[in-house]
Image (cartoon, helix red, strand yellow):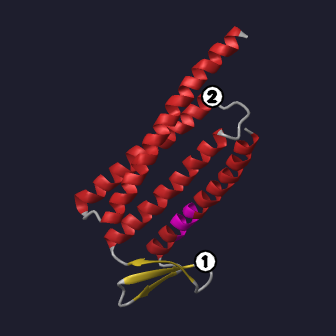
Amino acid sequence: MNTVRFVARILLALSRVLALGYALSFLLSLIALSTGWSLNLIEGDQRFEIFYPFTRVPYLLGMYNRDYILMFLLLLGLYTLFFFLVGNVFKVFTLPKLFTAYGIRQLKRFYLGNLVLPISSAFAISLFYGIESPMVVLVILHMLLGVFTYFMAAIFKEGFVLQNENDLIL
């Protein structure tokens, strides 16, 4: 179990760095696209470049139209949440006691986030815009991850009940 805790600590740190990176990218994009700061329009105002702050070095590129920008910001925001939630799952595996109510709660949040958010986001986007095949693939992958995590949460719940029964006996 020590190896699991060690790997979980590394993955927790990595997921927090990724969540922070996505959050900062979301904030920078939101500020740039709403104020024009660190933003450069190219190709006849059809595409945009968002620069690293206080530089002229491009960081993010995209199409400069309302539909694309909304999906772009939604994607950055959802992946911020995804990496934060996956970090909470890794945190469960760093704790001394594995089967806890806290662990079950984190797994439940993660599987609900992977089942509900991608489907509802894709559905909302499909009401106004067309759905492209890469989005369908992402939704399916997140659904599979959600279902797998749901099974893991059920196992953790059973382990929690058994652990509590065992603690009462001892």
Residue stretch rendered in magenta on the structure: 22-28
Name the residue nearer the viewer: 161 or 60.
161
- Quadrant assignment for the C terminus: top right
The residue under the point 51% across, 65% down is 26
Task: Locate residue 59, reporting x and y percent.
Answer: 55, 78
Name the residue nearer the viewer: 167 or 27.
167
Residue matched to label 2: 100
The residue under the point 40% across, 47% down is 143
Task: Locate residue 27, reporting x and y percent.
Answer: 53, 65
> Which residue, as the protein is rendered here, is positioned at the far bottom?
44
Rendering quarter of residue 47:
bottom left
The amino acid sitting under disc 1 is Pro
Task: Locate residue 140, reporting x and y percent.
Answer: 37, 52
114 within the magenta span: no
Residue matched to label 1: 53
Tell me the distance, in whole angstroms, between the alpha carbons under discs 1 and 2.
Answer: 43 Å
Task: Locate residue 15, reporting x and y percent.
Answer: 62, 55
Q: In this view, does 60 lie above or below 117?
A: below
